[in-house]
Image (cartoon, rainbow, N blue to C red):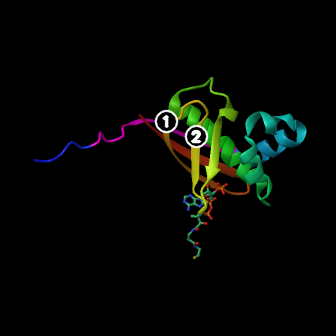
Amino acid sequence: MPGKRAAAPCVSGLGVDLAEVDRVRRLAERAPAFLKRTFTAGELAYSLKSRNRYERLAARFAVKEAVIKALDAKRLPLRDIEVENTASGRPEVRVKGMPGLRLLVSITHTSTAAFAAVIAFK
Ligand SMILES: CC(C)(COP(=O)(O)OP(=O)(O)OC[C@H]1O[C@@H](n2cnc3c(N)ncnc32)[C@H](O)[C@@H]1OP(=O)(O)O)[C@@H](O)C(=O)NCCC(=O)NCCS
């Protein structure tokens, strides 16, 4: 007799976002507080060490907007959404105060635009 199987995770939301690299660069240069208001220390450390820093920041901005879409949570502060990269470079995303939430993320960026897709599971 088959044993009990764990319930399969159920997709509860999908979000995508496209961020323009120049827009993020302009915001960062004109209003430096934007960086601290929007990104965590870890995201800033990861992005700013790189030559393509504004691509990476735009990508993280896109992830945050995609998470908001996936969760239908417009009031979620952007800084409460954090992207971290594993040792292999794979991005992971977490939301502060929501430890049980499972999100899948994928990112791509060029010199002009960054795109992120996020799937949320119940
Ligand atoms: C990881 C890889 C797929 C990224 O693709 P890319 O076209 O270089 O760059 P993209 O802009 O599309 O993607 C970059 C993002 O991929 C994500 N990424 C990096 N490593 C990853 C991994 N192991 N798994 C999932 N996502 C990964 C990151 O989020 C990265 O952005 P970030 O550093 O700002 O977080 C690519 O570098 C790679 O390793 N390809 C394997 C094939 C290869 O090396 N070919 C060249 C020899 S022919």
Callout 1 crowding tier (Cα within 10 Å): few <14, some 14–19, many ≥20: few
Magenta residues (range): 6-19
Camera-side residue: 80 or 2?
2
Pick out the residue farthest to the left.
1
Q: Position of residue 53 (x, y in %)?
A: 77, 54
Q: Position of residue 51 (x, y in %)?
A: 80, 61
Look at label 2 and name its amino acid.
Answer: Arg
Measure the C-alpha gap from mark 2 to mark 1.
8 Å
Q: Are marks 2 and 1 in contact (CB under 8 Å)?
A: yes
Look at label 1 and name its amino acid.
Answer: Leu
Q: Which quadrant holds residue 66?
A: top right
Q: Which mark is residue 46?
A: none
Camera-side residue: 51 or 90?
90
Asked if 19 appears above or below 33 in the picture, the reply is below
N-terminal label among 2 and 1: 2
Give the residue displayed 63% in from the left and 46% down from the top.
83
Q: Which quadrant holds residue 67?
A: top right
Give the residue displayed 31% in from the left and 42% down from the top.
8
Camera-side residue: 77 or 65?
77
**Residue 8: in magenta span:** yes
- Quadrant containing the C terminus is top left
> Would you say 53 lies left or right of 107 here?
right
**Residue 58: in magenta span:** no
Give the residue displayed 80% in from the left and 37% down from the top.
36
Identify the residue under disc 2.
Answer: 94
Identify the residue under disc 1.
Answer: 101
> Would you say 40 lies left or right of 27 here?
left
Q: Position of residue 49 (x, y in %)?
A: 79, 57
Callout 2 crowding tier (Cα within 10 Å): few <14, some 14–19, many ≥20: some
Main SS of the magenta segment? strand
